[in-house]
Amino acid sequence: MDLNTYLDQLEYLTNIDSCSDDPEGIKKVADFFADGFREIGWNVEYHDLAPKAGPCVICTNREADHYDLMLIGHLDTVFPKGTCAEWPFRIEGNVAYGPGVSDMTNGTLLMYHLMRELPEEINDKLNIVVVFNPDEETGSFFSEPLYRSYAQKCDYAFVYESGGSNTTLCNQRKGCVGFVAEFIGKAGHCGFVFTNGAKSAISEMAKWIVALDELQSEERDTTVNVGVAGGGTKVNVVADHAKIEVSVRLSNPDEVKRVEDTIEKLKAGAQERGIQVNMLRYRVSPPLNPTEEGKKYFEHIEKLCHSKGIDIKYKARGGMSDANRIAPHGPICLDGLGPEGDDCHSRDEYLLIDTILPFFELSQVLIKDLADNK
């Protein structure tokens, strides 16, 4: 792979505003990859999923009923339109900076170069599907049903989120119970609540926040974050509306039941108190934990890489990726295969340039191994 070409393309892509709610920007990034894959003779499908979502691009080296390998990365970032003009791509020594440079333009671009330089004998042997997801940062709500249909007929899935220091890959991620709850009470003057029947949606919301926070457990490795909370209009008016957005992260899938039992008790209590609760959004994404078959594969590639002088390690992560959503459908998932970067979702987001080629070569080793063992 030519590193200078990669860096030139990285600058071009990083300087495109492509927030999850910017379909025009995401389409511009998607067009780059679609054109690139057409140029190397792959099948390219554009899927317009929703008016507010950019296109999902699916590339295959051939039509097939079964795929040996899926490569997946996301096109969207968390930065609002205009960020690229304020904070454009730049290189300082060994470090590249820019919005989304390591989450995850570095990984999606690496996927393209890997397939562009795929040896003919491997291309002939493996059926490969490459997925460019437009909405991972907002939970893959629109894209998951589409790429799930491919995951169900794949053996392996490589996810190109940024790798960790010293070639640290990811084979475990926390799952999530995420929801938005709306509380509907009855407005009234705050001085007459004993006679006017006013019901405070904010008071109900507060009960939920306290109860949910009590689910947090270091022993169980379960965290609870009420990230957004609000409601009401004036200090002398009993609030008839409030809303919270909640993310519960968990390593043990059994924790889902504990969370859901608490939510059901809270809903029942709210009804008794005369408060209507609407779940505007509710989703459970399971934790990514290796299966026995997966553990054997990870041990195999660790030995394989060590034999080639590549010292890889594995580390669990608290954040989620599309690996959480792919693994339940069958493929063995290996995550963190993108070049090393960190401080994602901030102005300090960076990519270490000297890790680009090592991670490229690592993927080449892994893909060749799949072909050799087919």
Image (tube, grey):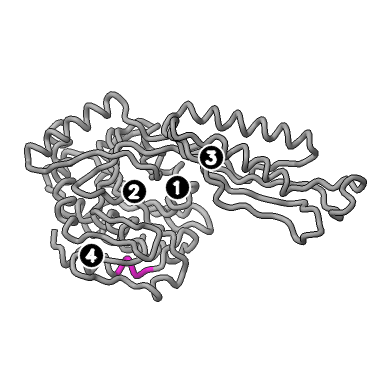
Disc 4 to disc 3, C-alpha distance: 37 Å
Residue under numbered circle 2: 131
What residue does disc 4 label? 95
User: Which residue is denoted by mark 1 in the rendering?
Assistant: 143
**Mark 2 or 1 closer to N-term?**
2
Give the alpha-carbon distance from disc 2 to disc 3, as whole Å.
Answer: 22 Å
Residue type at mark 2 is: Val
| Residue type highlighted by circle 4 | Val
Q: Residues within 10 Å of mark 4 (few under 14, many from 20)?
A: some
Does the CB distance between marks 2 and 4 fall below 8 Å? no
* Mark 1 element type: loop
The CA span between labels 2 and 4 is: 27 Å
From mark 4 to mark 1, how far is it between C-alphas? Answer: 32 Å
Query: What quarter of the picture does the N terminus occupy?
Result: bottom left
Q: Are marks 4 and 1 in contact (CB under 8 Å)?
A: no
Q: How many angstroms separate mark 2 from mark 1 (CA)?
A: 10 Å
Circle 3 residues within 10 Å: few <14, some 14–19, many ≥20: few
The answer to whether the residues at label 2 and label 3 have Cβ atoms under 8 Å apart is no
Which of the pair 43/338 is nearer the observer?
A: 338
Question: Residue 342: x and y, percent?
Answer: 31, 56
> Nearer the N terminus, badge 2 or badge 3?
2
Name the secondary structure under disc 4: strand
Amino acid type, label 1: Ser
Name the quadrant containing residue 191. Answer: bottom right
- Where is mark 3, residue-wise? 283
**For discs 4 and 3, the disc positioned in front in the rendered view:** 4
Badge 1: few (under 14), some or many (20 or more) residues near its Cα, within 10 Å? Answer: many
Q: Position of residue 227 (x, y in %)?
A: 55, 50
Which residue does the image show at 33% across and 67% down from the upper left? 98
10 Å neighbourhood of mark 2: few (<14), some, or many (≥20)? many
